């Protein structure tokens, strides 16, 4: 299955970055039983937050979706590191939680989160179909527009 995932990443023109190290007193992931819990990932690209500000003021839906895609790419990078390089161990993405920094009047968080959901499903296929939440936030770390965390079922 890892070959299929690598093929899909290549078709999408995605190269997974090195997994980022934690910026504070937490770990990037926890494996408990057959579940992988991934800490929230920001839209980091080339070592910096690529999309900043609030949806509905500084950032439009398309840029928010791109931010969510970058978060999903970083989720996959963290999963790859956690799983010894083998994304084929992912049996199912159980849930994605999307946190969207947005103005109080902005109500399209679900559309922004589609960026992450679509990327995960496109890369992982059936195993990428997941439950999710898309929640508006007043602010996120480093002024990021989006943050996404994940829970995955994995093969031992």
Image: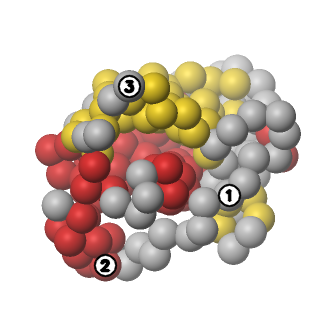
Crowd band around label 2 with a 10 angstrom C-alpha radius: few (<14), some (14–19), many (20+):
few
Q: Position of residue 118 (x, y in %)?
A: 32, 49
Q: Position of residue 87 (x, y in %)?
A: 33, 56
Q: Position of residue 126 (x, y in %)?
A: 15, 44
Name the residue: 56% across, 23% down: 135
Residue 49 lies left or right of residue 64; in this view the side is: right
Secondary structure beneath dot 2 equals helix
Residue 53 lies left or right of residue 3; in this view the side is: right
Name the residue: 63% across, 54% down: 43
Ranked by sequence position, the earlier of labels 2 and 1 is: 2
Residue 137 lies left or right of residue 125; in this view the side is: right
Name the residue: 26% across, 40% down: 155
Of residue 130 and residue 110, the one placed in the foreground of this image is: 130
* Disc sitting over residue 10 in the figure: 2
Q: Which residue is mark 3?
A: 33
Inter-mark Cα distance, 2 to 1: 21 Å
């Amino acid at each position: 299955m890892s070959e299929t995932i690598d093929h899909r990443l290549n078709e999408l023109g995605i190269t997974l970055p090195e997994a980022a190290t934690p910026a504070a007193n937490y770990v990037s992931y926890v494996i408990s039983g057959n579940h992988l819990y991934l800490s929230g990932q920001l839209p980091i690209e080339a070592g910096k937050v690529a999309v900043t500000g609030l949806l509905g003021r500084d950032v439009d839906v398309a840029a928010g979706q791109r931010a969510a895609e970058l978060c999903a790419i970083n989720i996959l990078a963290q999963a790859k590191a956690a799983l010894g390089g083998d994304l084929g161990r992912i049996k199912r993405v159980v849930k994605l939680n999307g946190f969207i920094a947005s103005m109080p009047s902005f109500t399209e968080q679900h559309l922004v989160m589609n960026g992450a959901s679509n990327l995960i499903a496109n890369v992982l296929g059936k195993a990428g179909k997941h439950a999710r939440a898309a929640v508006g936030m007043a602010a996120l770390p480093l002024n990021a527009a989006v943050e996404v965390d994940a829970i995955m079922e994995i093969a031992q």
